[in-house]
Amino acid sequence: MKKNLKKLCLLGGLLVGFSGVYAQSFTWISSTDNDVWKEAKTKLQISSRNTPVLSVNGTENIQTFKKWGTCFNELGWDALNMLPMEQQNTVLDNLFSPDGDLRFSMGRIPMNANDYARDWYSCDEVPGDFQLKYFNVNRDKTTLIPYVRRAKQVNPDMTFWSSPWSPPSWMKVNHYYSVRSNSKVNKLPAEAEIALYEGTDDVDKKFYPKQVAVNDYFIQDPRYLQTYADFFCKFVSAYQEEGVVISRVMFQNEPWAYSIYPACAWTPEGIIRFNVEYLAPTIKKQHPGVQVYLGTLNTNRIELVDKVLSDPRMKDAVEGVGFQWWGGQVLPEIRKKYPNYKYMQTENECGSGTFDWKAAEHTFNLINHYLGNGCEEYTFWNAILCDEGTSGWGWKQNALIRVDSKTGAATYTPEYYAVKHFSNKVVSGTKVLQYKEKGEDNLPVIVFLTPENKYLVVAGNFNDEPKNLAIQLGSKYLDVTLQAHSFNTFSMK
């Protein structure tokens, strides 16, 4: 009798645990350009009139998702402060509250100026200061740190990671913050670019960059390399003193971006040298609780990434790998070859200041790709900008929230809703089961299993006409017609 009772209790527990998987009713949230976040109801069917594009039974597991986040930039802080205080609080709640719209719980903090700083600065611009006597975060105390504190008031559990766009200018071979010369936006002489390629012609139009730097722009002298590793530790300590704990660092934003804004070109040999011999051991000694990731990798030339990761010392130096921009193209193959690393997406692509539905579809597709290929964290770029999203170096970019500097009004852009269709429902602990790329049918789809053991489906239709979509979930089918140019989230009740 006791054995039978135990069996019944066990069976009952299993039924309770998996009851959500077989529930029938779904909340269907859809958005189109002129009609966002509309709720309806739908139910699973016992059969489907259409061939399923995906079939899952709940046991699949590409990865378990952890966090959404965004980068804290000076121009974002300026845009936020154009709003009345009540509206500022609403924006911050929508971005960072655990119960808000986007539920960001992770922040990226630029080390020194990035391309959405007001202008160039670093934490130590005193040439030859190998003791970092003049290191300080005084400027950050007036911009980024107050911005971070406002977010932490909304979500005290936020975590933070950091990377530089450029080292202090005196640590670089060209003694300047950029790599490229542009007479309109910087003062780097054109002849200073000679160090980049040294006359080589390594051009391949299938890849970006078309040419690969033959020199490290960071000076490869042990004094400079060690000082720079110490610089990272100083930065972590300085932020910690301000109540902001940085739990992860990456050595460089886009080491293969040769830009007119803050940047630094690296070779694979230089990347290995700095991370393995200097950054990782110094961080481990001075800040043992801080993770070192290899990032942010932006090239689709897989041989370059493979050359770095194939060095046997890298596995002891870095815990994970961060990809953005063109690097996402080689993510599937790299993750397959190096499955023991953690993977994250480090910067959503920025667009060109159009703030339109087409840009939102691009972002939606990127999220689908990175999560479907094993990234357990996802970082957006500009959460908020004003007007046309113009940087201090003169180009325009998109943002999730757009502020009119004249009226002090905030607009939630189409891209905001592309993000919300994922981040509002895909919480920490959600498993990614299967996904489908956009493909020729223009239907990106991804299937999740929530911590409550319930299916969650996010799908887009990027076509000019409605499209049928069928997905097999266990023994039942989600069979619906998606509106033209729509984002859709199906959450099991």
Image (spheres, rainbow, N blue to C red):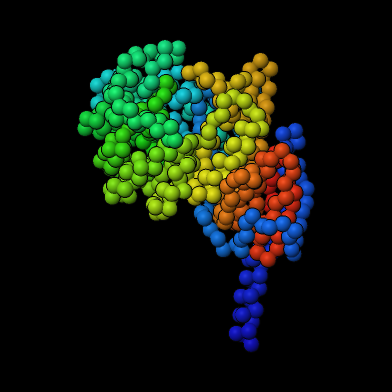
Vertically, is 311 above or below 216?
below
The C terminus lies in quadrant: bottom right
Residue 378: tell me if it is visible.
yes
Pick the residue in front: 233 or 462: 462
Query: x, y percentage for residue 410?
Result: 67, 25
Outermost residue on the left side: it is: 222
Residue 94: tell me if it is visible.
no
Query: x, y percentage for residue 155?
Result: 57, 39
Outermost residue on the bottom side: it is: 1
- Left or right: 30 with respect to 157? right
Pick the residue in front: 406 or 198: 198
Vertically, is 332 above or below 106?
below
- Left or right: 436 with respect to 294? right
Q: Quadrant of residue 38?
A: top right
- Left or right: 328 with respect to 311? right
Number of numbered discs:
0
The residue sitting at 30% across, 20% down in the picture is: 194
The residue sitting at 61% across, 40% down in the picture is: 364
Vertically, is 17 above or below 488?
below
Q: Quadrant of residue 19?
A: bottom right
The N terminus lies in quadrant: bottom right
- Left or right: 414 with respect to 67? right
The residue sitting at 38% across, 17% down in the picture is: 181
The residue sitting at 74% across, 41% down in the picture is: 465
Query: x, y percentage for residue 281?
Result: 28, 43
Q: Quadrant of residue 17?
A: bottom right
Query: x, y percentage for residue 64?
Result: 52, 53
